[in-house]
Structure formats: C-alpha cells, structure tokens
Image (cartoon, helix red, strand yellow):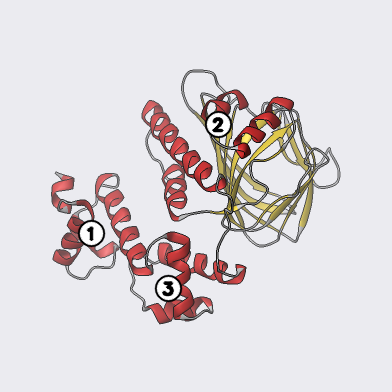
Amino acid sequence: MALRLYEHDPDNLLIKRDDTFPFFLKEGGIQEHRMQFEHPVAAGYYQEIYFDGMHIGYGNAVFSDKVLLNFESDFETVEMHFALKGKSKVFSEHFDQKVGFEANQHNIVYANQMRGKMQWESSGNEICEINFDPKLFKRFLPEESVLFEQFQQAIDKGNSGKLNPDNSHISHQMYQLIQEIMQCNRKGTFKKMFLEAKVIELLLLQFEQLGEAKPNNTSLKKSDIDKIYAVREYIIRNLDTTCSLINLALHVGTNEFTLKKGFKELFGTTVFGFWNDAKMEQAKVMLTEQQMSVGEVSCHTGYKNQRHFSAAFKRKYGILPSQLKS
C-alpha cells in the first residue's frame, strides 16, 4: 500500500510512503513514526501511531502560498478527520460531493484508492486524523439511522464520500480528547489501551453530532464562531493569567454579549467555567504525570495563594491536590 504527495512532478515528491498503512496491524504491539519535512512549498511535522487496525496521525504545516498538491493512494480507509487550524479542499473524481474543511470542523470520510488534488491555504494548518480498517470501523457503525446505513452501503460498494454532507464544529469534549491523544506519554501496552479508549470515545461524540439532522444548527455567524474559537485558544495558551470578559472580547474583535452567548452555545459552559476547568485539568496532569509539587502547580496555573488553588482543585475533583499526589 502506498501514498504519494507531490506538487507538479511525480518524481519530486513531498511525501512518499511505499508501505503507508502497516498500521493496520491485526494484532500485536504499537508502533510510532515522526516525520519532519522542509520543502520549498511546506514545512512542518507529522506524527503517526498505529496498532490493531487503527492509525492516529497529527501534525502541522505552514505553506509558502496557497498550494495545490497532487496525491495518489492505492488503499481504502475510513478517516475521522479533525481540522484544528487552517483550510483545505480535496478535488477528486472519486468523490460525488465537495470535501473541504475549515478550522475547527470535523467529519468522517471513506476513501477508496484515491487520486486527485489537495489545496491548502498558506496560513498555519493543523490536523488530527484517525484511520480505521473499514472492516473494523463497521463494527462500531450504528444502525439506527438512514445516514449511517447509507454510509455503510457506500463502504460496501467502495464509493468514497463523507458520512454527513455537512461538517460539524469540533466540540469542547472533542478537543479535550484530541489533546489527551496527542499528549499521551504512556508506553507500550498501556499507551495502546489508553489510545483505543480515547479513540472510541471520540468516535462516539462524532456519531452523536454528525447523526443529528442539523449538525451546524447555530445562530452564530461564521466570523463570530472563529472569534470564539480564538478566545478558547487564547485561554488554553494562557492558563496562568487572568483576563476580564470585556478584554477577552476586545482581544478577538467582538463584544461581551456575543462572546458570552456564543461560548455557551458552542462549548456548553461559560468562559470562566471553561477557564477554571482547563486550569484544573492541567493541574491534574502536572501533579500525576509531571511529578510537580502542589506549590509549583499552584504557581503554574496562576494562583498566588496555594490554599485558594487547593480549594478550587477540591471543588473540581473532590479531593485535595496533596491527597492526589499521595
């Protein structure tokens, strides 16, 4: 099985994999591969993890300009696709519908021996994609909906396409799971068990969201959605700071009302509820996996008073951070 990605000349390859999906291992351990690439048209990295009929791939790339790349593949796969940043489109006679993604969108795509063109925007692009052997994927595919039934029929007939014609927005829960997958530091069998559980949980969330009649039913304009996701990213990158709601709104060019309403609509929580949960989740990782002291974690999560941090941690998890460490 092979994958080839090139700009104009098939002999001048950006990516070439002659054994692209050995990750469809039927049994056994877990394998990982990291690819760094520096090319006139693109620079970035791509991390791969593969085991037991599944493949996890994630990475980012910056393109020199809007780039149109040719691709060829000789295998079939079902892909959970998450566009974390950037914008891309795929043009292929094998698809009977438009296949494109903008930032913070997801869908499930079946691809069977594809060839065509892939267009990437010049801004930073970041993706997470999880591939299944189609036989394995069909074990999880629900049967309660015409949408799922049609997708299974398409797989059985070898007809490439998306599960839902409309992409959905990546939810807060999905982002949490994606981060856990990308940041997993476990090894061997324990890593495999952890990733399998997270992938199935993520697939469940996709099925629930994509299976709805109107997955993108929202009162928000696209420009407002982009700004609210920008606030989310700002919070994740600045967990050790504090900021007022009005300043967060001004930071992304919106108003306080739109931010409050839109954040609740997209993520099911308030801005500061999300900020506090993100701090506590990071604190838990620091305490259990990075072996940091309670004082160090308190400082890294923006608390000047360690007792205030301990109280907030107990409200979230029901135990003191010192008890978690012991």
Determine whether label 3 and label 2 are within 8 Å by CB: no
Q: Note whether 273 is above or below 6 in the view shown.
A: below
Q: Quadrant of residue 295?
A: bottom left
The amino acid marked with disc number 1 is Glu
Q: Mark 3 or mark 2: which comes first in sequence?
A: 2
Q: Which residue is mark 1?
A: 296
Q: Residue at x 56, y 33 (%)?
A: 55
Q: Is residue 243 left or right of residue 163?
A: left
Q: Mark 3 or mark 1: which comes first in sequence?
A: 3
Give the position of the N terminus as an image quadrant. top right
What is the number of the mark on residue 260? 3
Q: Position of residue 166 (x, y in %)?
A: 65, 51
Q: CA distance from mark 3 to mark 1?
A: 32 Å
The amino acid marked with disc number 3 is Lys
Q: Note whether 219 is above or below 285 in the view shown.
A: below
Q: Secondary structure at mark 1?
A: helix
Closest to the camera, between mark 1 and mark 2, is 2
Residues 204 and 237: in front is: 204
Q: Quadrant of residue 95?
A: top right
